[in-house]
Image (cartoon, coloured by chain):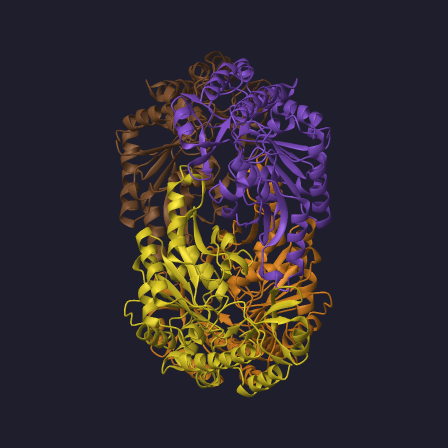
Chain colours: A yellow, B purple, C brown, D orange
């Protein structure tokens, strides 16, 4: 069985494991105060062109989203997100569990637009009973989205502008950030993201690390006491250096982007193969997740040799499925898949 | 200005004030352990034909909903409700603030149906990633709904059946319960409500009391330690007898139903007047809230003399507005209004 | 049975009931936006000599404490309180239920002192692992305390100074504030309280009202969006005017203080009677709660005719008990009690 | 600088890193559903002599404590713990953040005894105002404690018995469990722990793993839906196999106990060296943490070459400090330390 079902099926990029070996006997202080974390922070600040950014390392995505959102909002506020946003759907109510409603906006492709945020904001404040409703307190987006789509620079500029006008911190979930930033149609840089968002995270788990997410806080007002929040929400790793070492390796010479490119190149090959064969796609993704719409029999046939995930029912006898590549995907496996697609 | 904007514009029914006078110097123990509370509980149990019911008195609706829901659910569970449900919209995120997601179902009229609950339940358990999603843990309905509509006995039987099959406690928000039970088309009794729901509350605030809601818990599994929950959530009135006295008065000889009938009769007169004039209604309500769709100029004209609430925009130049009657509405005011409607 | 067990055994002061009668048929908007609330706010601002104060009305004490504290603290912060503080002991974990630890300080008499707060604050910030501990975020005191004791002006000045130096908002629970401000030894005015605290509440439930507490927020930084918090925590009474009318009555011409004096005068008579008889007291209270230490047989004897509450075991065969007076206590009942004490 | 300041200064045991290498390219499903996790679960069940145990893997200690406690308690309940318990002191209020009070018991050495639990339980239920107080809902102990001390089998039997009589689930924090089970004076086996506790965790982070804690749930009533809780609280690692591989390695042939013994043997050597020199100890620890009481000048002298942690002030001019060993501590470093102690 060759697995394309998600982007966390393997361990870590070889260079990361090597560095864990090399540093294993070093004695370091705990909780992210060691030199590896310091170096990783410096590399990330540089990559973001943001000398004043606060950079923190947490273990996983749900934890990171929860910690950031809990830190930013007051109790009567909610976080605005696409109806398909990870925090709205797939975190077992983690945001509600820390007291906050996810205020969802309709979305066909996983993205939300500046005007939608403005409308929701105005609707709240124009309602005479607004004190009886959850106040929008921040905006959450993911880039790429859960559907593989990406924001253009113009879209992110517009979102950022509206958010600042409305006093809503903009938080970007970058669980797959690398795969977005290297995609063909992308016109955003990491520095753009840093400039336009109040906080965001650079995903490690799905982009070469064993685990780990790097939170970057740009807005000074959101920086205070964040380490308390990490500790309380269970994200402060005793051996914090494990996170430092991984992000140091990913960012010291661009490895993060190299392995992102590898994954996206392979995803584009898979996409092309399905397209050539006449299959259409549920979302127009140029990143590492592809969502072809396949007839039942094709699913069955490919399912004998490959694992991929069922996404949703499409028209009679058809399914939307998801094929993921990652930093770890082997080119030969993709080639075999393509042959099999062609042979359908 | 004659007010029809809501059903809590006046104080309390005269007989309640009289009883508060008469009992004012009595010395009673606190926190709902006095004899008035005991009597009120007995009257309510009788009215519900439910000798084993636990009856508790709380101050207001948001508090009651929050306390019941927080008491029933485990942290990973959510409460299923209509998208227009009070807990989903107008409680400033009180449910989320105690850790729970409101799992909303689409609804045109404020009601949800048994099949919708079953579908949502099945969708959860059939999803292979269900552990990543909020588990449906109970069902919340309001009767009458926020739109003035009511459940038929058949509908409530069906909902109750599905809920029991799925192991989902059914909780009915009866903030306006009286107005539902006396409506013309209603075929439900209080005993039916008690038999079909696991918990519900009988609203006092909007039906003759100064304030107060009587929670009735039918399901033994939900009874344990509920008084701790009331205290923690701020609903345990020091002078609990104030609640006991009010519900004693409302239920000792049917006052609750008499004054409900008064309000609904007047609402039907208003409804008829608008209908005669050719106006249509946003919801088909037979209870104390009426939602005519009125042109801007009619709103303006009537707005000079009457207060009513804006509900939402309708077609170009039209608005849905809400007229409420209550136990306190004066017949002469309604007659004046009707004349003015006719004169439009 | 003549009840001295607590200060909420009766209904409300006669003038309050009269006003509820008189205003009963008035139609007012809901949720504290009516004219009675406006007037009550104006009277209270004047009594506090604080034109810029925000004044809000809530229903009960636990609710008020929870709402204020939840509004002020960030998630990693706790509230500093005496180990005997109401929030630490008798609110069923309401503060923890909204996410915050109560950081308790030892206290023999219910009071805490400026130096204790400073020490705790310094201990936190001097600890190298402080990010692993709950950060002190505000200070809670009660005046009079749960033990009937009161702060002197010098003590409150000192506390206020330390709190401001440390950036810790000072919140005063005034459930029995009237009884403290009229006590013989008291040198604090309501204006002092307003000047020295960041927020406090003026208790109505125990001082003549049916129910209700008036929150006064002095610190501008704590004012924002407080009404959202009231709604979310279940304290926004639909018929908000009920609270407005009560506080209007209590503060328009000093009734609040008159009835407080009545209670304290009677308490002093009881105190003197026990003292004359040679009994000592657990706390040195000059307010409406008295804590004599009585032998078992005296408890038994007095218990035949009077209800009072057991506080704690004292030396072998002795008990600390509590006698409360209130605005409603009848002088003749106190005189009878005193005779019976003398006759022991 | 040779570090004895804590037991998480290095990476992981060599065999664990080797296994991560070997398995790195394996493709596995996520979230703990892979074969390594299955094997690790089987090994642990066997080591616990508990075929029906549920075994789950989480990332860190605070997260594990929070997840278990949040899963067990209802909102009005608290968790009983020693005043020095990790959850009471060093988790930034994580337990309060999920809504629960930590009900602390006095303790001189980090342990609590059966009678203390019984007393607290009885005091709660005998108090007539118990509904106004947090109800004890479970008991938390750590073994070894934060002070290095351990429970005897008799003590744990007694605690377990009282907990079962009172209906209080007993949860044991085993962050350093290995170091307790191999200590000289220990008479508990892992099977005893499993038999006597309702839930516990076997710490990996401090005992050879990179990170990771294995939760063992023995009580059937506590098993339901625990994976939802792990996900919600941020503990469900995408690459769950990383935890499985580590615990598989630690438990397939007793490595966990071997490396625990190594650490404890070295700790005993350090203890003996200090004792020979006439220093006394703050706690009587036979595990990997030692708490000698040292004069300022000794601290200064040793501090030039070794890092250890300051614990608290002792008598004038003396300090309690902590020396930790671990699976990673080098014998030669301990020998050097001992020489330096002797040379003082």
A281 in relation to C269, above or below: below
Residue D158 is situated, as x and y percent measured from the top left of the image, at: 67, 56
Q: The C terminus of chain C appears in which quarter of the rendering?
A: top right
Direction from residue D25 to residue C44 in the image, left or right: left
Name the outermost residue toward the bottom.
A332
Name the outermost residue toward the top.
C332
Residue D51 is situated, as x and y percent measured from the top left of the image, at: 73, 68
Name which residue lies at 33% across and 40% down.
Answer: C223
- Residue A125 lies in quadrant: top left
Name the outermost residue toward the front.
B278
- Residue D6 lies in quadrant: bottom left
* Front residue of this view, candidates D189 and C28: C28
Could you tell me if residue C109 is visible in this image? no
Residue B192 is situated, as x and y percent measured from the top left of the image, at: 71, 32
* Front residue of this view, candidates B90 and C257: B90
Direction from residue B326 to residue D312 in the image, left or right: left
A278 in relation to D172, above or below: below
Residue D43 is situated, as x and y percent measured from the top left of the image, at: 68, 75
Direction from residue D293 to residue A316 in the image, left or right: right
Could you tell me if residue C31 is visible in this image? yes
Name which residue lies at 63% across and 56% down.
Answer: D170
* Front residue of this view, candidates C31 and C327: C31
Number of numbered discs overlaid on the protein picture: 0
Q: The N terminus of chain C appears in which quarter of the rendering?
A: top right
């Amino acid at each position: 069985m060759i697995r394309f079902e998600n982007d966390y099926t393997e361990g870590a990029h070889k260079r990361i494991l090597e560095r864990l070996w090399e540093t294993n006997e070093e004695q370091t202080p705990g909780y992210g105060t060691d030199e590896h974390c310091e170096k990783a922070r410096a590399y990330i600040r540089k990559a973001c062109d943001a000398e004043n950014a606060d950079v923190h390392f947490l273990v996983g995505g749900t934890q990171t989203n929860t910690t950031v959102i809990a830190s930013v909002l007051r109790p009567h506020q909610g976080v605005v997100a696409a109806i398909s946003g990870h925090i709205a759907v797939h975190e077992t109510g983690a945001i509600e569990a820390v007291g906050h409603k996810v205020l969802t906006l309709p979305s066909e492709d996983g993205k939300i637009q500046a005007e939608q945020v403005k409308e929701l904001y105005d609707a709240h404040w124009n309602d005479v009973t607004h004190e009886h409703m959850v106040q929008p307190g921040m905006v959450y987006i993911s880039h790429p989205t859960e559907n593989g789509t990406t924001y253009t620079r113009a879209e992110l500029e517009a979102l950022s502008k509206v958010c600042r006008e409305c006093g809503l911190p903009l938080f970007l979930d970058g669980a797959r950030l690398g795969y977005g930033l290297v995609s063909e149609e992308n016109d955003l840089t990491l520095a753009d993201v840093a400039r336009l968002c109040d906080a965001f995270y650079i995903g490690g788990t799905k982009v070469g690390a064993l685990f780990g997410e790097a939170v970057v806080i740009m807005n000074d007002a959101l920086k205070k006491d964040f380490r308390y929040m990490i500790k309380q929400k269970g994200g402060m790793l005793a051996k914090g250096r494990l996170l430092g070492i991984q992000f140091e390796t990913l960012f010291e010479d661009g490895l993060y982007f190299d392995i992102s490119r590898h994954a996206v190149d392979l995803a584009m090959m898979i996409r092309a193969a399905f397209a050539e064969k006449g299959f259409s796609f549920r979302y127009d993704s140029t990143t590492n997740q592809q969502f072809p719409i396949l007839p039942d029999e094709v699913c069955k046939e490919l399912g004998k040799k490959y694992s991929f995930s069922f996404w949703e029912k499409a028209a009679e006898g058809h399914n939307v499925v998801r094929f993921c590549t990652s930093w770890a995907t082997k080119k030969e496996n993709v080639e075999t898949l393509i042959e099999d697609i062609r042979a359908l």
